[in-house]
Amino acid sequence: MLPAIAQTLANILVGDTSLISTESIDFNPPSSELSGPPGFNLYCYGVFAKPTEENASDDSELVQPSPQASFLSPPRWVDASFLISARDHTWLGKHQLLSEALTSFLKHQPLEEKFLAPELRGNGSLALSLNPNKIISPSTLWASLGVPVRPALYLTITVPIR
């Protein structure tokens, strides 16, 4: 599941930003190194199960089920949270990349099934949030990574697990 989510997000970043390949995306946590070739850190910092009761009340907001989904047992839903930070030789370049990523993900809300990795298809569109996860604050996250706070996007995608 996590590789499929990361693949989906990386493909969207490459398709909608000035990056030309997924080789420009590092899936490790951001490091103290602030410069380098243009690219992104796409780091999964948490996977949080959604309570069953919340799923029952929020299903209409989370997905638009596809016809084949009705034949399967109902999935459990989790929130996978990612930190997206930019790398470049200049701060202006980093801000440009983050702006491109923000614009891209704003237009992909909800995340349509046609953009999903094959393993995530079959449940319709998936919810995509551009807010930090409520469970861990950005300052706590950056402190745990051991690097200073810097501009970043905090993205959470709600995905099914069967």
Image (cartoon, grey):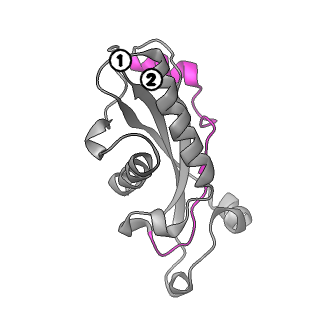
Tag on residue 89? 1
Residue 93's disc is: 2
Using the image as rendered, state which of residue 76 and residue 120 is in the foreground: 120
Q: Residue at x 38, y 63 (%)?
A: 117
User: Which residue of the protein is positioned furthest toward the left in this rendering?
Assistant: 23
Q: Residue at x 38, y 47 (%)?
A: 14
**Looking at the magenta stretch, what is its main secondary structure?**
loop
Up the image or down, 19 lies above or below 11; here it is above
Q: Amino acid at mark 2?
A: Gly
Locate residue 41, reporting x and y percent: 37, 32
Q: 97 or 157: nearer the eye?
A: 97
Query: Which residue is painted at 32% across and 37% down in the image?
Result: 27
Q: Look at label 1 and name its amino acid.
A: His
Please report the bounds of the magenta region as a residue range.
Answer: 121-145
| Label 1 Cα neighbours within 10 Å, binned few <14 / some 14-19 / many ≥20 | few
Q: Tell me: residue 116, above or below residue 152.
A: below
Rendered location of residue 76, percent (x, y): 53, 64
Give the quadrant of residue 118.
bottom left
Residue at x 50%, y 18% (from the top left corner): 150
